[in-house]
Image (spheres, rainbow, N blue to C red):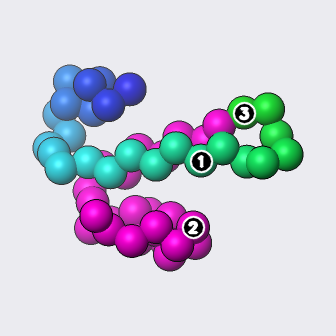
Amino acid sequence: MVEKLGEGGADPPHEVFVIRPVEEPFVVVYLALDRESLLADTVRDEFDCPRG
């Protein structure tokens, strides 16, 4: 999925979040096109995941 971001014309750096809900049999993958985006900041804030 991340490789396809570049093929689609998105410029790095990207932010990738993989979230596995404890009581569900699936994972959620967020691909944020911009590390400084509202989506990336919201996911970091919601899941207490500071920018590394």
SS label for mark 2: loop
Sequence-wise, which precedes: disc 1 or disc 2?
1
Residue 51: give x, y in percent of width and height.
32, 68
17 in the magenta segment: no
Q: Is residue 12 left or right of residue 47?
A: left
Label 3 to label 2: alpha-carbon separation:
17 Å
Label 1 to label 3: alpha-carbon separation:
9 Å
Q: Are marks 1 and 2 in contact (CB under 8 Å)?
A: yes
Q: Is residue 9 left or right of residue 28?
A: left
Residue located 52% across and 44% down the image: 18
Residue located 52% across and 72% down the image: 48
Residue hosting label 3: 26
Q: Amino acid at mark 1?
A: Ile
Residue located 72% across and 33% down the image: 26
SS label for mark 3: loop
Q: Are marks 1 and 3 in contact (CB under 8 Å)?
A: no
Residue hosting label 1: 19
* Dot 2 alpha-carbon crowd within 10 angstroms: few under 14, some 14 to 19, many 20 or more: few
Residue hosting label 2: 47
Q: Relative to the observer, which residue lies in front, 47 or 32? A: 47
29 in the magenta segment: yes
Q: Are marks 3 and 2 in contact (CB under 8 Å)?
A: no
Q: Amino acid at mark 2?
A: Phe
Specify start and end residues of the magenta stretch as a single range.
Answer: 27-52
Sequence-wise, which precedes: disc 1 or disc 3?
1
